[in-house]
């Protein structure tokens, strides 16, 4: 039997999951150019001041909750145990909306996160929203002498993680116990073998 694969997601996988949810929340007519994972590497060509664009960024957040680890050992085969480490990671999702409809689009994405369809899509990736989210923040941005409409929304999500590691087991142990007086043989001879 093969060792299970770790379930931990990369930041790109997390962003892609939220990109799909945001596209669905905006009616499904959006595409990957209007709901983007991170900022493009090169500055040009960028979108226009009249374009509605959403940027999704995911970063792991330090939190007391993600420091707790539970390790379970189970027998894998005659010479190995399987160590399963289970814990929760906390992700901070930043949605930055640009364009004349940025506030409305941000509201639609935020509202969608409370709906069953978004919950189910994210739960399939072991991602779960913390219900206390930030309010939408309208923050117009001055870029090249023009004020671009911008709305930000931040929310934290939990990721249920399982990591797996095979550990070698001890084949046998011999324990010899002697008294403080010389005797020709051990007082006890205990030999344990097997897992």
Image (cartoon, rainbow, N blue to C red):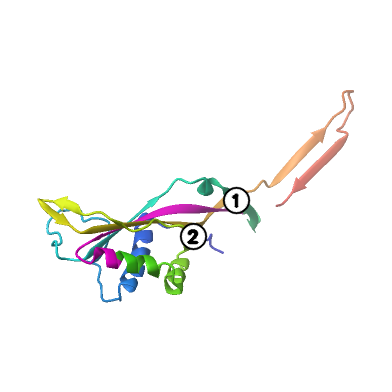
Is residue 192 visible to the viewer in this orientation of the structure? yes
Residue highlighted by disc 1: 70
Q: Indicate whether residue 14 is drawn in magenta.
A: no
Residue 180 position (above or below residue 119): above
Q: Nearer the viewer, residue 80 or 146?
A: 146
- Packing grade of label 2 (10 A; few <14, some 14-19, many >=20) is few
Per the image, label 1 sits on a secondary structure element best described as strand
Residue 49 position (above or below residue 168): below
Give the quarter of the image for residue 140. bottom left
Position of residue 78 measured from the top left corner of the image (x, y, whole percent): 66, 56
Question: Which label number is shown at residue 5?
Answer: 2
Position of residue 76 measured from the top left corner of the image (x, y, whole percent): 62, 58
Distance from label 2 to label 1 (Cα)? 17 Å
Q: What residue span does the magenta drawing correspond to?
A: 82-105
Q: Nearer the viewer, residue 194 or 109?
A: 109
Q: Which residue is at 50% across, 56% downward?
A: 161
Question: Which label number is shown at residue 122?
Answer: none
The reply, left or right, for residue 118 in relation to residue 67 is: left
- Packing grade of label 1 (10 A; few <14, some 14-19, many >=20) is few
In the image as oriented, which residue stretches furthest toward the left?
145
What's the magenta bit mostly, secondary-structure-wise? strand
Whichever of labels 2 and 1 marks the residue nearer the N terminus, that label is 2
Per the image, label 2 sits on a secondary structure element best described as loop
The reply, left or right, for residue 194 in relation to residue 183 is: left
């Amino acid at each position: 039997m093969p060792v299970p694969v770790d379930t931990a997601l990369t930041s790109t996988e997390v962003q892609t999951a939220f990109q799909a949810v945001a596209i669905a929340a905006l009616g499904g007519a959006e595409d990957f150019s209007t709901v983007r994972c991170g900022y493009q590497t090169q500055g040009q060509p960028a979108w226009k001041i009249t374009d509605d664009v959403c940027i999704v960024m995911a970063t792991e957040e330090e939190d007391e909750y993600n420091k707790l680890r539970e390790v379970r050992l189970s027998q894998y085969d005659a010479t190995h145990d399987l160590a399963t480490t289970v814990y929760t990671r906390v992700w901070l999702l930043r949605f930055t909306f640009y364009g004349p409809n940025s506030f409305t689009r941000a509201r639609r994405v935020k509202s969608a996160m409370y709906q069953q369809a978004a919950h189910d899509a994210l739960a399939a990736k072991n991602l779960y929203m913390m219900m206390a989210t930030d309010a939408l923040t309208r923050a117009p941005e001055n870029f090249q002498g023009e004020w671009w409409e911008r709305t930000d929304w931040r929310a934290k999500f939990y990721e249920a993680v399982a990591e797996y590691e095979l550990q070698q087991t001890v084949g046998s142990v011999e324990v010899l116990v002697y008294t403080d007086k010389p005797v020709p043989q051990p007082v006890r001879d205990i030999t344990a073998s097997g897992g």
